[in-house]
Image: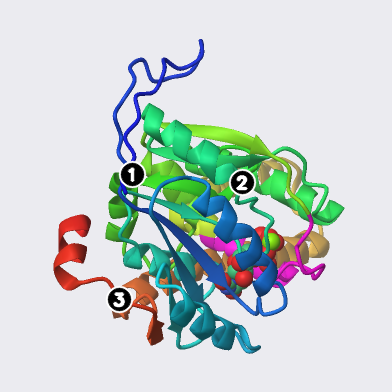
């Protein structure tokens, strides 16, 4: 079954100026999963009818990101029951960003939607995504209206991160946009070509460009009532990864600081010389000495640490290891010829 629609002209203010005839022969959904056994039935019960209602052929690609609960059994089960569900299981936990990339490598659709397993990304929204894709947008993303589901600390630190990221990298991340989005085949191919190991999807999406549209939506609490899989420490590492992969300013700022400090030191030395010549020498300032030694050793250690952050990542990339390792594939794998067509 294929659906071809002529779309009426978009509302005033909408970007595309001409109606397009985009045909969706297959819509793919990518869902990364870490220990989602509890909410699994609820997810399928809600997802399947809303995908059926779209009136286009669809496939769901689950990525089990090294779950330690019964997620994999549920995946095996659903993949044998219905051929539209496929899954890969990674050999360990690689993190959501890499799990998503693994899913995108598998999809065969003309467009792919990335969504969370916990129903915090409402499947009903996919119909809207698809409509805007047909209007000609290449990327349609969900924008969270309120972040009430997050803790205060999470919201504050996220707000601060967006500001710092923009100031340092020059790349503007659309506010409150996450991974929940539809990507045209072109965008999927572009992402699939980005082989970097330290992945920061939000930044990659923004860097990639394409005609994009944000759709506001409310974020419900996690379906299973549990907490986020992100622990504060992991989020902090993730924020550093994001910054380091999109800007080298922290690396360069030390040379400017060094210049300023050297200039100050020369000025201070000159001042000291003049003072000694005119008024003679008094007891040299011991506190000044200790404070400056402490301060400058601190600065040097910080700058070394920053260099280390980058060097470590260069090392990660240079090793050239695969992005992830698949331990098991469930469901019918795409045919080789088909994949080649779509991925070129
Ligand atoms: N997830 C994953 N690997 C991880 C962490 C999370 O695949 O290491 C999945 C998780 O199962 C869920 C999605 O990523 O489908 C979002 O996770 P979560 O709901 O914990 O994050 P939040 O909603 O707080 O962004
Ligand atoms: Mg969630």
Q: Is mark 1 within 8 Å of ligand 1?
A: no
How far is the residue under mark 3 from the one under mark 1? 20 Å
| Residue 114 drawn at (x, y percent) | 50, 56
Q: Is residue 224 visible?
A: yes
Image mark for residue 187: none
Left or right, 314 with respect to 40, comes to left
- Quadrant in the rendering for residue 278: top right
Task: Assign a secondary structure to mark 1.
Answer: loop
Q: Nearer the viewer, residue 91 or 3?
A: 3
Tag 3 residue? 333
Spot the residue most to the front: 1
Left or right, 212 with respect to 275, comes to left
- Magenta-span inclusion, residue 228: yes
Image mark for residue 24: 1
Tag 2 residue? 124
Q: Which residues are magenta?
A: 221-241
């Amino acid at each position: 079954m294929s659906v071809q629609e002529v779309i009426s002209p978009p509302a005033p203010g909408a970007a595309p100026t001409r109606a397009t005839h985009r045909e969706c022969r297959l819509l793919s959904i990518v869902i990364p999963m870490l220990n989602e056994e509890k909410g699994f039935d609820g997810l399928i019960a809600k997802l399947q009818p809303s995908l059926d209602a779209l009136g286009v052929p669809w496939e769901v690609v689950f990525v089990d990101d090294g779950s330690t609960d019964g997620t994999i059994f549920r995946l095996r089960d659903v993949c044998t029951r219905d051929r539209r569900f496929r899954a890969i299981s990674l050999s360990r936990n690689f993190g959501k960003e890499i799990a998503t990339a693994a899913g995108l490598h598998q999809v065969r659709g003309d467009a792919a939607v990335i969504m969370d397993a916990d129903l915090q990304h409402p499947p009903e929204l996919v119909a809207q995504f698809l409509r805007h894709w047909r209007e000609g947008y290449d990327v349609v993303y969900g924008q969270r209206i309120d972040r009430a589901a997050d803790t205060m600390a999470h919201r504050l630190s996220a707000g601060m991160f967006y500001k710092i990221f923009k100031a340092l990298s020059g790349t503007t991340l659309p506010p409150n946009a996450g991974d929940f989005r539809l990507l045209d085949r072109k965008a999927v191919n572009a992402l699939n070509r980005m082989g970097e190991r330290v992945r920061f999807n939000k930044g990659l999406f923004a860097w990639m460009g394409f005609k994009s549209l944000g759709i506001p939506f409310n974020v419900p609490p996690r379906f299973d009532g549990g907490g986020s899989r992100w622990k504060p420490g992991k989020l902090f590492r993730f924020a550093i990864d994001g910054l380091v992969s999109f800007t080298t300013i922290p690396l360069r700022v030390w040379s400017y600081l060094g210049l300023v400090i050297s200039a100050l030191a020369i000025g201070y030395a000159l001042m000291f010389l003049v003072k000694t010549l005119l008024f003679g020498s008094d007891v040299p300032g011991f506190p000044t000495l200790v404070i400056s030694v402490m301060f400058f050793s601190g600065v040097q250690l910080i700058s070394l640490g920053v260099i280390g952050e980058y060097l470590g990542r260069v090392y990660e990339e240079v090793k050239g290891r695969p992005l992830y390792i698949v331990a098991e594939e469930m469901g019918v794998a795409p045919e080789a010829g088909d994949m080649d067509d779509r991925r070129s």
